[in-house]
Image (cartoon, rainbow, N blue to C red):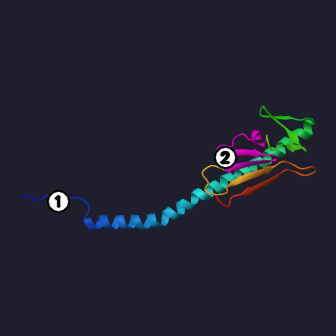
């Protein structure tokens, strides 16, 4: 009679592979977990750049036309001291998905959704002879 040789992995080989995967996972998971925080921070920094650019574009439109409100992408943008006011700065942006926008007086705050702490961009409309103040806080992203 011929003996049939069976193919497959031994139990020791399987245990070694599982142990190696466990070791790799122990190093990889913390590395990927911090990427989520870094992604929220980068998104918030990107939005601050968009707000700065949009305010500068609205300022340029105001200087070119000399009238208020200026029209950006079909949205009327009210101008205060040459720059967008707090109530309409969000309308200058093409997309603010992922952020909750709230306005209180001369300040508009864009808060990153899903952040456990402070992860926001704050736009304070321009004062006389000064540009708007745009502050970024990514300490709690």
Q: Which residues are magenta?
A: 88-111
Residue 50 falls inside the magenta stretch: no
Residue nearest the viewer, comparing 31 with 2: 31
The dot on residue 99 is 2
Q: Quick check: 82 left or right of 55?
A: right
Give the CA separation, mark 2 to mark 1.
62 Å
Q: Quadrant of residue 97?
A: top right
Is 85 located above or below residue 119 in the figure?
above
Provide residue 23's location: percent of width, then percent of height.
42, 68
Q: Quadrant of residue 81?
A: top right
Residue at (70% x, 51% y) in the render:
46
Residue 92 falls inside the magenta stretch: yes
Provide residue 32's location: percent of width, then percent of height.
53, 60
How packed mark 1 is, by other alpha carbons closer than 10 Å (few <14, some 14-19, many 20 or more), is few
Residue at (17% x, 59% y) in the render:
5
Q: Quick check: 41 left or right of 84?
A: left
- List the residue tagged with mark 1: 5
How packed mark 2 is, by other alpha carbons closer than 10 Å (few <14, some 14-19, many 20 or more), is some
The residue most toward the left is 1
Q: Earlier in the sequence, mark 2 or mark 1?
A: 1
């Amino acid at each position: 009679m011929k003996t049939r040789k069976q193919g497959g992995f031994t139990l020791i080989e399987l245990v070694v592979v599982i142990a190696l995967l466990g070791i790799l996972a122990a190093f990889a998971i913390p590395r990927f977990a911090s990427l989520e925080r870094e992604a929220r921070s980068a998104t918030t920094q990107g939005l601050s750049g968009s707000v700065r650019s949009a305010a500068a574009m609205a300022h340029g439109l105001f200087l070119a036309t000399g009238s208020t409100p200026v029209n950006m992408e079909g949205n009327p943008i009210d101008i205060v001291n040459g720059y967008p006011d707090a109530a309409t700065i969000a309308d200058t942006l093409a997309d603010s998905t992922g952020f909750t926008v709230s306005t209180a007086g001369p300040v508009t705050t864009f808060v990153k959704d899903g952040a456990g702490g402070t992860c926001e961009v704050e736009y304070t409309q321009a004062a006389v002879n000064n540009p708007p103040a745009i502050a970024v806080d990514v300490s709690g992203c």
